Image: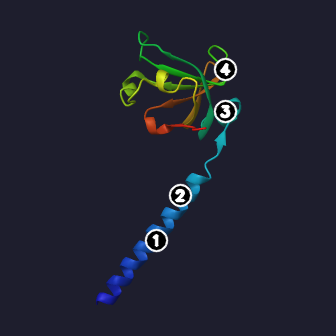
Amino acid sequence: MWGGRIKGQIIILATILILSVIAIAAEQKKEVIKPKDALQYVGQVKTVCGKVASTFFAGRSRGRPTFLNLDKPYPNQTFTVVIWGRDRGKFEVPPEVLFMGKEICVTGRITTYRGKPQITVSDPSQITLIEK
């Protein structure tokens, strides 16, 4: 009686272990793209890495967005990270201060606004600082 139960538990644990290894491997294979290439991946979830060239918190605009512009400053940015006002409080330091001039990677679904690629961030875990 106990032997069958233990075998079942071992099979469950082995399955969990295998799935965990597969998930970790998939995460490590996450394709990182450059901001200039992001337009090719619209609609897909990707990780985009680049230098924050300019930032702006539009505190008086509808939705109170924060913009992090990669590679080149606005209006010539290559890629934009958008953080809506409802999500700003999730950051310990205002994002426009925290990330200005830093190399970052942002993960999310790539969309466009006025022909420019962007990712909307709703959680700080979507952005990682690249330490050099």
Circles 1 and 2, Cβ within 8 Å, touching? The answer is: no
Q: Position of residue 107 (x, y in %)?
A: 54, 38
Is residue 5 something one can see in this rendering?
yes
Between the C-alphas of marks 1 and 4, the distance is: 47 Å
The residue at 66%/31% (across/down) is 35
- In this rendering, the answer to whether 91 lies above or below 115 is below
Q: Position of residue 7 (x, y in %)?
A: 38, 83
Between the C-alphas of marks 4 and 2, the distance is: 33 Å
Residue that numbered label 3 is attached to: 38
Q: Quadrant of the N terminus?
A: bottom left
Residue that numbered label 1 is attached to: 15
Is residue 44 something one can see in this rendering?
no
Instruction: Give the residue type that dot 2 points to.
Output: Ile
Between the C-alphas of marks 4 and 3, the distance is: 14 Å
Instruction: Give the residue type that dot 4 points to.
Output: Lys
How many neighbours does mark 1 have within 10 angstroms: few (below 14), some (14-19), or many (20 or more)? Answer: few
- In this rendering, the answer to whether 35 lies above or below 20 is above
- Label 4 or label 2, whichever comes before in sequence order: 2
In which quarter of the view is residue 77 placed?
top right
Residue that numbered label 4 is attached to: 72
Between the C-alphas of marks 2 and 3, the distance is: 24 Å
Left or right placement of residue 88 versus residue 70 in this view: left
- Label 1 or label 3, whichever comes before in sequence order: 1
The residue at 66%/37% (across/down) is 41
Circles 1 and 3, Cβ within 8 Å, touching? The answer is: no
In which quarter of the view is residue 72 placed?
top right
Residue that numbered label 2 is attached to: 24
